[in-house]
Image (spheres, rainbow, N blue to C red):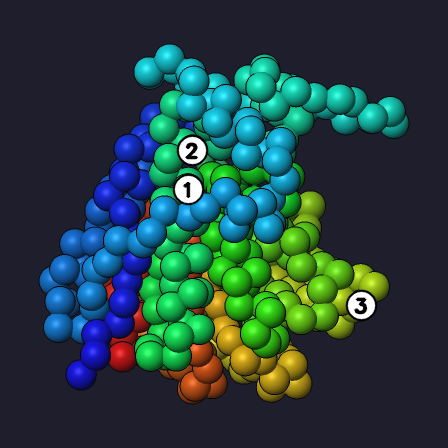
């Protein structure tokens, strides 16, 4: 039996965001290294099913295929910050005239960012580049056709990052980068099951009819990212009809959650008839998650995984959120086990 390849690089752990600002409060940062450590531990406990591997380091041109030069430059500017120094963007220029910004000036970071919870420091570029390397390597490997399902332990996560902006703990859009690798070879379906709407991924492919983005998440009237993720957002131009948002209220349990997947997302996938599936897998739908607010339990992730495994498509599972670190590893393995 071949084990599921799982990509991860230890240097992803060099980035340690200490705290964050949320609604004016300073708090412990949710996106800690304990998250990835919990997942690695669980994968190692199930060595018979999962094979941990290091990716090749992503090349600049693969990132440039999705993100703009300024955003990348800003991260390399962050790499020159003194050890221990953290910069939180807090000035977000907007208005009727166009502002110009300089990504070699760290004080301009807010031009390339949309919230105050996503810090920059000396290590962020290294960790984010390895995080992206995992999903790109997974995509290249899926094209070889030897394995049907591959897991990318991407941390920091990616689905809130767009072409030119970071935020929501995300720097590079790992799922989006994988989609760009697959797109020349066929239609790509991205399904985002993180508790939060994947605004970055939506924006990247909003006008694209070859990459269909579907997301099921907490209602943005109540939950982050607040300004998008509404069912009325259905795509634009050629991409009209190739974007789907399913917004659910707080407290949602497995049954209504799975019913919504079966009623809205699965039929859309069948109509689209993709060659590849990318699952943006957040686990902040877990009932104990400190940020998310659904009522999904460990075994439920297996049930959710089955819905997507049934499609029998070449699949890349890309890690997104999930902040109850103690159980994150077992929740991840529960989802993955539906595919082995
Ligand atoms: N401290 C992902 O799950 N704000 N990002 C939360 C509470 C941002 C979550 C405020 C949440 C972003 C990938
Ligand atoms: Zn999330």
Figure check: 39 above or below 96: below
Image: 257 above or below 36 = below
The earlier-in-sequence mark between 3 and 1 is: 1
Q: Residue at x 57, y 74 (%)?
A: 185
Q: Earlier in the sequence, mark 3 or mark 2?
A: 2
Q: At numbered mark 3, what does the secondary structure look like: helix, strand or loop?
A: helix
Q: Front-most of 177 and 40?
A: 177
Mark 3 and mark 2 in contact? Answer it, CB < 8 Å: no
State which quadrant residue 215 falls in: bottom right
Which corner quadrant holds the N terminus?
A: bottom left
Query: Residue 212: x percent and y percent?
Result: 64, 69
Residue linked to disc 3: 238
The answer to whether the residues at label 1 and label 2 have Cβ atoms under 8 Å apart is yes
Q: Is residue 80 left or right of residue 93?
A: left
Image quarter where the C terminus lies is bottom left
Q: Nearer the viewer, residue 331 or 65?
A: 65
Q: Confirm if mark 2 falls within 8 A of ligand 1.
A: no
110 over 157 or under it: above or below: above
As helix, strand or loop, the secondary structure at mark 2 comes to: helix
Identify the residue under disc 1.
129
Distance from the alpha carbon under mark 1 to that under mark 2: 6 Å
Question: Marks 1 and 3: in contact by CB < 8 Å?
Answer: no
Residue 281 visible in rendering: no
The label on residue 125 is: 2
Q: Alpha-carbon neighbours of circle 1 within 10 Å: few (<14), some, or many (≥20)?
A: many
Residue 56, image x, y percentages = 33, 51
């Amino acid at each position: 039996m071949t084990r599921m390849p799982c990509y991860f690089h230890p240097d992803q752990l060099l980035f340690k965001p200490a705290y964050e600002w949320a609604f004016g409060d300073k708090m412990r940062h949710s996106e800690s290294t304990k998250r990835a450590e919990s997942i690695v531990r669980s994968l190692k406990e199930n060595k018979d099913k999962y094979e941990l591997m290091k990716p090749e380091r992503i090349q600049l041109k693969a990132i440039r295929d999705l993100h703009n030069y300024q955003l990348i430059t800003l991260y390399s500017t962050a790499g020159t910050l003194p050890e221990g120094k953290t910069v939180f963007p807090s000035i977000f220029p907007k208005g009727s005239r166009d502002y110009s910004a300089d990504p070699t000036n760290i004080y301009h970071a807010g031009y390339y960012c949309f919230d105050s919870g996503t810090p920059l420091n000396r290590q962020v570029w290294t960790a984010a580049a390895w995080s992206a390397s995992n999903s790109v390597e997974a995509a290249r490997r899926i094209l070889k056709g030897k394995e049907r399902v591959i897991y990318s332990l991407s941390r920091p996560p990616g689905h809130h990052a767009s072409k030119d902006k970071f935020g929501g703990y995300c720097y590079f859009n790992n799922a989006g980068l994988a989609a760009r690798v697959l797109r020349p070879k066929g239609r790509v379906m991205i399904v985002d099951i993180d508790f939060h709407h994947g605004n970055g991924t939506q924006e990247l492919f909003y006008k694209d009819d070859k990459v269909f983005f579907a997301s099921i998440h907490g209602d943005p009237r109540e939950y982050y990212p607040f300004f998008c993720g509404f069912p009325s957002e259905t795509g634009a131009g050629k991409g009209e009809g190739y974007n789907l948002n399913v917004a659910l209220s707080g407290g949602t349990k497995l049954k209504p959650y799975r019913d919504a997947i079966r009623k809205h997302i699965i039929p859309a996938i069948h109509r689209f008839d993709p060659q590849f599936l990318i699952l943006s897998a957040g686990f902040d739908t877990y009932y104990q998650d400190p940020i998310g607010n659904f009522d999904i339990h460990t075994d439920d992730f297996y049930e959710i995984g089955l819905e997507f495994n049934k499609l029998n498509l070449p699949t890349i599972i890309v890690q997104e959120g999930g902040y109850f670190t103690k159980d994150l590893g077992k929740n991840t393995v529960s989802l993955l086990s539906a595919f082995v």
